Image: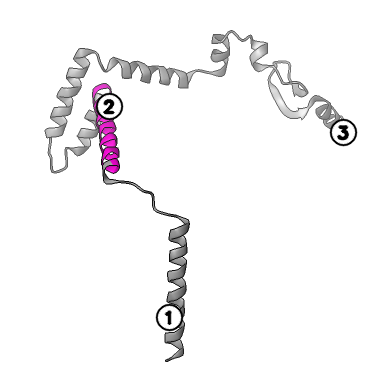
Amino acid sequence: MSFALEYRKRLLARQKASDVADAEAFPAPDVDAAETSGNRYRVLCALVVAAVILATFNSGALVHYARGLADGPLGPGPVEVSESWHEMMEAKGITRLVEAIRGGVMGAREISWADLSAGLGLGRGDATAAPTGVAATDQDTITSSLPAEAQDADSARP
């Protein structure tokens, strides 16, 4: 027998031995078909509920998405259906919740730190005062990360 065939037999024998050792070290989970089917059903139900909630409360986004499908093989049908759905949701007042949440988030994004500290009842000195040991100007704003002593020593150098 040639050297190459002998080497190949030994290599395959080692690989089979390591595969058996891996299988013993990490056994496959014991899952039956009924449990897997039940999990699939739960996930499907969760996805359907999420889709219904999104279609109900965020129907404006559904219209926007459907307009992107108008050039596809379905044609303008999804756009018409989604627009009528959105009009129905607006007529019932369901979309006001999403609009209120969206407006609140946009308002929160535009608020300044001064407005936030005033709204929380923090005085000007409380919200912008320099931490202990940090040099600050007369306006109580932080100007350096150096402690006050180090900044004074640094400014005294020639």
69 w.r.t. 27: above or below: above
Q: CA distance from mark 2 to mark 1?
A: 60 Å
Along the viewing direction, whichever of 155 and 150 lies nearer the viewer: 150
Q: Residues within 10 Å of mark 3 (few under 14, many from 20)?
A: few
Front label number (2 vs 3): 2
User: Residue placed at 25% from the left, 32% from the top?
Assistant: 45
Instruction: Name the residue type under label 3.
Output: Arg
Along the viewing direction, whichever of 155 and 61 lies nearer the viewer: 61
Q: CA distance from mark 2 to mark 3?
A: 65 Å
User: Residue placed at 35% from the left, 15% from the top?
Assistant: 100
The dot on residue 9 is 1
Q: Residues within 10 Å of mark 2 (few under 14, many from 20)?
A: some
Quickly name the residue at label 3. Answer: 157
80 w.r.t. 4: above or below: above
* Quarter occupied by the C terminus: top right
* Membership of 46 in magenta stretch: yes
107 w.r.t. 50: above or below: above
